[in-house]
Image (cartoon, helix red, strand yellow):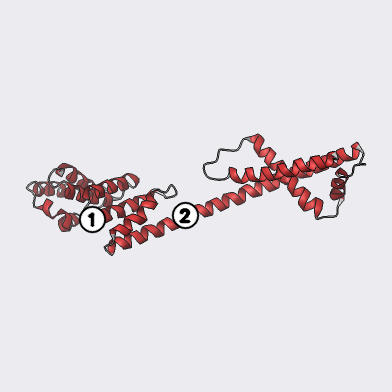
Amino acid sequence: MPVGVVIFIVVFCGALGGLSQSLIGRLPGAEPEQPWRVWLTRVFIGAVTAVVAVGFFLQSDFSEAIGKLFQPTSQPADEFRALMLLSSVSLAAGFTGHALLRRMSSQLLKLDTEIKALGGQVKISDAAIAVRDNDPERAIELLTSILDSADVSKLDRARAHGIMANAKKKLRLFAEAAGHVDAAHKLSPEDYRYLFNRACYRWLSNNGGAIDDVFRDLKESLDKGLEFRDIEQDEDLATLRKHERFPEWAKSVRQVPKHT
């Protein structure tokens, strides 16, 4: 078998391997590419680009040079020049091809991430509707897959925990509801609604036993923007407002101006 044929087979097979390696290297969780692998990939992609796009489809000096690699009677000097031409064009094409491939794969991954995020937001909205329609089981089913996913932003994850808490409340699982709004508060600490709901669910899950924690959450939520009338009107806190400690606590927080 002529040397040129052997070289062509090696380069062509290497090109396919390099192309696969480049694609796999852009997948989430893949190890960072080492510099020597990047160079090999560029050469491989360039080789297949040059051979297929130029060597076979264009009538040019380059295709004639490649043809000499397949001629058993070619002189070593001709084969060497042809090989050098193939290598140089391959390298140039490889830089371009590899850069374009990486950019395309990056854009595809970005688009895939955006699509997943949009799908997650739709599920969260559907779960909120399910809670409103008194179908907490459906909401829990939708939100479980969201909370198990790694492709959810912090704010969307916080929102999912908040709605999950509402669904658990519908099922009177107050301790679990408190756990979910606690998780939501850690993800979005400036949102007073999660603090307020945590106070409500703590009170409902341990009536009278966690009153200090409840007052602490209510005070912090007031500092972050909650209106006191929300505490006075919320049905979940009806028994808290009848507690002997509530009037004194209410008086103390009303005398303290809100932080600006």
Q: Mark 2: few, some, or many residues within 10 Å (few <14, many ≥20)?
A: some
Query: What amino acid is at disc 2?
Result: Lys
- The residue positioned 31% from the left and 45% from the top of the image is 183
**Residue 260 position in % (x across, y down):** 27, 48
- In the image, farthest residue toward the bottom: 133
Left or right: where 111 falls relative to 193: right
Judge whether residue 74 can be spotted in this image: yes
Q: Nearer the viewer, residue 80 or 145?
A: 145
* Disc number for residue 116: 2
**Residue 184 position in % (x across, y down):** 32, 48
**Residue 42 position in % (x across, y down):** 69, 42
Q: Secondary structure at mark 2?
A: helix
Q: Secondary structure at mark 1?
A: loop
Write down the residue under mark 1.
171
Asked if 160 appears above or below 209 in the picture, the reply is: below
**Residue 11 position in % (x across, y down):** 75, 42
Q: Nearer the viewer, residue 226 or 86?
A: 86
- The residue positioned 16% from the left and 47% from the top of the image is 253
- Mark 1 or 2: in front is 1
Q: Earlier in the sequence, mark 1 or mark 2?
A: 2
Q: Mark 1: few, some, or many residues within 10 Å (few <14, many ≥20)?
A: some
Q: For residue 36, what is the image quadrant?
A: top right
Query: What amino acid is at disc 1?
Result: Leu
Judge whether residue 258 can be spotted in this image: no
Q: CA distance from mark 1 to mark 2?
A: 29 Å
Q: For residue 84, what is the image quadrant?
A: top right
Q: Are marks 1 and 2 in contact (CB under 8 Å)?
A: no
